[in-house]
Amino acid sequence: MRLIIRDKPEAASAYVANYIIDRIKHFAPTPAHPFVLGLPTGSSPLGVYRILVEKYKAGEISFENVVTFNMDEYIGIPRDHPESYHSFMWKHFFSHVNIHPNNVNILNGNAPNLEAECVEYEAKIKRVGGIDLFLAGIGEDGHIAFNEPGSSLASRTRVKTLAYDTILANSRFFGNDLDKVPKMALTVGVQTVLEAREVVVIILGARKALALQRCIEQGVNHMWTLSSLQLHPHPMIVCDEDATLELQVKTVKYFKSIEQVALAQGFEQILSSKVRTGPGPETVVQHPREAVNGNGGDDSPTVLSPQPTTSRLLRASSPAREYPVRSSHSPDVGGSDDLVPDRMASRIPEPGLAQRLTPTPEAQSRVGAVGA
Amino acid sequence: MPSAIRQAPPTGNGITKFTNCRLVVGDSLVDGDLWVSCLTGKILRSQATFYDEHVLPGETIDLGGRILSPGMIECQLNGAFGFNFSTLLEDMSQYGKKLMEVNRQIVATGVTSYIPTVTSQTSELYRKVVPFLGPSGGLRQSSDGAESLGAHVEGPFLNPTKNGVHNRNVLVEAHSFKDLEEMYGPENLTPTPSSEGNPATPIPIKMITAAPERGNMASLIPEICSRGIIYSIGHSEATYEEASAAVEKGATMITHLFNAMRPLHHRNPGIFGVLGQAESLPRPYFGVISDGIHLHPTTVKIAYNSHPDGFILVTDAMHLVGLPDGAYRWTNGDEENFIVKKGAVLLLENSETIAGSSSTLVECVNNFLQWSGASIPQALKAVTATPAAMLGIQGTKGTLEAGGDADLVVFSEEKNDDGTPRIVVDEVWKFGARVFLNQGPFS
């Protein structure tokens, strides 16, 4: 986890915007090898969009070869409704930069078949080789996209009913009339976000402080879906001073010191070059159809999909074919990540312990088994 | 030197994006972009174009913070560049040609549509001339220049005591609608239904100025309005009561307020009085000539403040607008006079009678800006949104809303010596294509 803390929200937004620009530049995207950017809506990323637009107008960055995927969209309001996320993105970002409409992807909340829309969205993300950087904001309850408290951490793009809190919070955009606020939305899942090669979250203001605390200092918990970020290999949270109000002093100091030391030592907290440049064009663009139509993609290169270890951890029942499994203790189990019963006693060369102290270890392991 | 460009070459998909503009929206200037198409000639719903058509503008024009306004609408124009609309030509086929020339020249002044005005004339002249002056934008050709929105017949049912420079000998009274039909020709008061091979054509006459107190005029107002023609009170001795009755019957406009009517008297406020709300009638729109000659600056200001939403700036310009100073022969029905033009002042020779004006509409806007302290968007509203609303075409003209016609003017803002703002026409666009570009004094 990288946690970047800035005194003011503007500085935090500027950090994120500059970080994204830096990532795109290093990526050197081309039409055959585009940079794939996941995008949020809401108040938190507004400053980021504003700076991205400024930098575009100043000629510092081009979005010509950037493909975007938005996190979510309401169901049941017209696409061009002023509060739709299509309108938000148009107003705050797309209308000001040189992104091509063909490269813009936003879930269609008015699709005739919403389920098919979600499946196709996931497939589209796969077709372009996965998301290189997913920018996110969070709600006061720690939700990421519309993955409200209690959402499965293994969720994918789907129809979601909004939490009452969210409907209340959104009613200010709909004339404070609860009846006018959409009750449902399409949203990418927690898993969809975690599969991005990198996730950057911007969290601003005291109102988000508790959520940030839960997500950083507490365990992974589906009631604070952002906490799933702890399982991602390359997460970064950028926040302002106010958002740290609920954090322990030592947590804040620790993350600040990491950044300072890194700067002092002359290296940045950057990603490995493979993650920074994404899959090469050979693996993505030249064989997109095989990768999609290959029924599971057993033969597709492993870099086709992003590789967080979380998918394996979260889906204990499904074999993780996509990712190699590392296990120093049971090299013989090969590609399976199923847990193998192991007795501490068997590792101790003491014949007296060979006899089982617990007569029915199977029953014991069932007690400890995690429910789905 | 300013130059008139006949038609901008279409680039790419015909979509132009104006960026970095201050858009005239209501009473304010709003930072934003505007997308227009020269194929449809309309202002685009940019968001829908992006998400539905998946297209980007073929051309992007950075206005660098300049003002983008709807094209100006002129509601009282008697002629321009030497051509008087109230003219019979020996070969009337030349009339259309001359009118087209005027349209192409006048668009360079920022006037993208207008109501050509015919003064009090004989029936023969109306019948011959009005068919040329009907709505001309049907083909949506930007190269045609400014567009007529229909003719304005100012007379001859006027009060002889308020004739202004109209020929008193042709002024008559109307007692029935038949009198109007006989005067203007019935075909000029009725829409032509579509026939084989010919689409329906709108009524050539859009507005009639008449004195409500003359003949039976007041009772004819509902019939006029029912045809979609605007009845405007003007050249009239009407009392406040008579004017109020006319408004009640459907009059929605006052022709050049204060000029050619009784002045405001505190015991009988006259026509001006209907701008009060005492009778709880809807207040009519009103034209105001802010050329610096017809009205005192303070009078203009009072008119504006009495009803800002009805305030329309007009030039009432004669055909001499755009010509050099001097004495010009003027045939007015059977009279022959000379008009002396000196700057924007037009006087009947050897008299002090104002013979109309020769100001351009942007000059009137600038006068108003200087006198009133109104903001630029407020002043521009008086030549865009308000006249469009008066004519009942608020969705298509005088607006920057998506779906409206892409008639646009780019203004740059300058300062007068006294610090008041002044605007200059930099570019004019008609139906989504550039038709005029002011290339500046040093090019």
Image: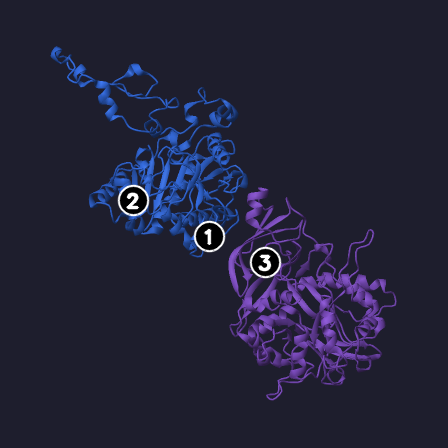
Chain colours: A blue, B purple
Foreground mark, 1 or 3, reads 1
Residue B298 seen = yes
Q: Whole-percent x and y of residue B100?
A: 76, 61
Foreground mark, 1 or 2, reads 1
Element type where label 2 sits in the image = helix
> Within 10 Å of the Cα at label 3, are there few (<14), some (14-19), or many (20+) other Cα atoms?
many
Element type where label 1 sits in the image = helix
Residue B78 seen = no
Q: Whole-percent x and y of residue A123?
A: 48, 31
Which chain is disc 3 placed on? B
Q: Whole-Å distance between the Cαs marked 1 and 3?
A: 29 Å
Dot 2 amino acid type: Leu
Q: Which mark is residue B2?
A: none
Q: Which residue is mark 1?
A: A180
Q: Which residue is mark 2?
A: A212
> Within 10 Å of the Cα at label 2, are there few (<14), some (14-19), or many (20+) other Cα atoms?
many
Q: Which residue is at a point 48% across and 38% down the rendered structure image?
A: A66
Which chain is disc 2 placed on? A
Dot 3 amino acid type: Leu
